[in-house]
Amino acid sequence: MSEVLLSAKNLTKRFGGLAAVNDVSVDLWRDRIHVVIGPNGAGKSTLTNLLSGDLPPTSGSITLGTHDITSAAPEQISRRGLGRSYQKTNIFLPFTVWENVRLAAQSRAAQQPFNPVRWLQSARHDAAVNERAEKALELAGLTARRDFIAGAASHGEQRQLEIAMTLATDPQVLLLDEPLAGMGVAEAESMVELLLRLKPHHAMMLVEHDIDAIFALADHLTVMVNGTVIASGEPAAIRADRGVQAAYLGEEH
Amino acid sequence: MSAPKSNLEALPRSIQFVLLLGFVALAAFPFVGSEFYQQMVARMMILAIFAMSLDLLQGVTGLVSLGHAAFFGLGGYALALMSSDNGPVSLWWTLPAAVAVAGLFALVIGFFVVRTRGIYFIMVTMAFAQMLFYLVFDNKELNFLGLLPLRLGGSDGVYINFKPDAALFDLENKKVFYYFVLACLVLVYVFLRRLLWSPFGRALAGIRVNEHRMRAVGFGSFSYKLTAFTLAGALAGLAGYLWGAQTGFVNPELMGFHMSAHAIMMVILGGMGNFAGAIVGAFAFEFMLELFKDLPTVGGFRLGKHWQLWMGLFIVAVIIFAPRGLLGLMERFGRKGADHE
């Protein structure tokens, strides 16, 4: 049986008079991929930002596992087991691919800044951190690129790095904001494969535009328009929904 | 391989070799230089420690403090206030105490200032430093709740009549003092280089490059920045202590705006983010300062009196032609020399 790992109830985010996210509820289950779709400006990224703590909600509540994380800081939410990637690539450009992932993995190491003994030890030799980073790099298919400077890597590789950094924190819940954006066909296929591989152990929310990927991955589909959920359910049911067809999928059929 | 906006963190062999030569030169200097120049070089080394402490914030963490001299001055004043007119005080408790006082102030001030960033960080660090400056400048004596009478000396400053007593060696001996400062310089440098590659140092570099992502992967950037601020303040306090011990005198200028600005210029001049640059920058800054001050009078215009003008032009030239500082320049020439790599 799968379980709900993240539950958001009646989330609203207002920017001035505009409700970017309006009374949205989302449940994320382990072993299920929840895909959020909608036209530009529908509030998908804002929803992601609310769940990850990048933005505080105006109202509503978010529970991660058994913890209320409604007003928690991003780092606290991350440490509770939520990992997110960004739509706009958000990495450490001057560092190597390896250092990007290693740094993300390091955030889970037990010692934190107040241990002066660790100030004299090289970060390179923490076996647990290296192992976690190595695994994330391999999952994302970046092992061969580890010594590249991230800023000099290709766009597709930077997208893979986004995912690798997210995985290096060992999250239970994954929020992926357009992981396929700008990827070539082959890259996109291997990303879909990776997401399916991650699925059994993670609860996943995906914001995506790629229709093929959406129907290959989605166990649950939510359609947002203007900050509001207009439909939510099994992909097949959504596909048949006339309202959704009119608002969003229309051109595809 | 072009790295966007990267610091020169890993020092290439050529620069390590130059640094080693520099160390040998510093170690040999008292045997060739007169006492006057020995004291000048000791002063440069003290300022190098101060500049390195700022580099931890400015170059590594990306926090440009315009009030770092406050902690330098606090270290000096801590020694002055612990000193007695009747005889020397022990180095072994006054030095840790002065470092602790500077670190404690940095912890409290840091608690407020590291919440801000960019231009706001620059402004609030300056504001706190100016508060301390005027607190000392305007008060000959200060008595907190009648418990702790402090002879701050106001704008006149405070004399330190005896160098601290180290028991094992005699700091009144100029040569011994010189080597003590050199030992401090080397220890602080080695410590900070190790720190740079430690998990803590890597996290600080991550915060400089992309604090948003650091928080998203689970780093509480506030505590990292506060720890760095406290550590930088404590090391600046060490430099201030040595300054007070060497000159036998502290005054409010040590905490002043100019002192803070000079430290920033030293770090930029030498090259940020690797501590070696801060040392090179401190030496270069002090050297150029002496050079410009000694400029002759030409046609009734005293060039030397306007040394700050020449210093300003010099720094602008370095920033234009060597944006990664003198050390970056050295690295570039080193690479050209060994192109097979």
Image (cartoon, grey):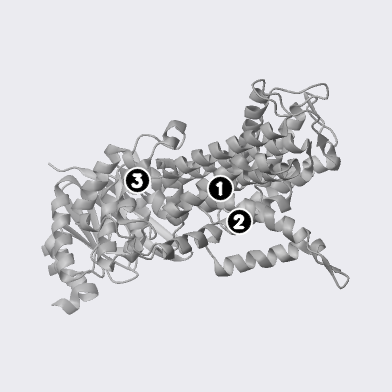
Amino acid identity at mark 2: Tyr
Q: Which residue bears the numbered disc 1?
A: B22
The residue lying toward the viewer, choosing from B179 and A148, is B179
Name the side, left or right, on which A100 lies relative to B55.
left
User: Contact (CB < 8 A) between labels 1 and 2?
Assistant: no
Residue B13, how many percent across, how many down?
Answer: 42, 52
Residue A63, how many percent across, how many down?
Answer: 32, 44
Residue B106, how many percent across, how many down?
Answer: 61, 39
Q: Which mark is residue B147?
A: none
**Real-space Cα distance between discs 1 and 2?**
38 Å
**Real-space Cα distance between discs 2 and 3?**
28 Å
Under tag 3, what secondary structure? Answer: helix
- For label 1, count other residues whose C-alpha is less than 10 Å away and answer few (under 14), some (14-19) or many (20+): few
State which chain disc 3 sits on.
A
Q: Which residue bears the numbered disc 3?
A: A78
Q: Which mark is residue B120?
A: 2
Name the side, left or right, on which B63 lies relative to A233.
right
The residue lying toward the viewer, choosing from B51 and B71, is B51
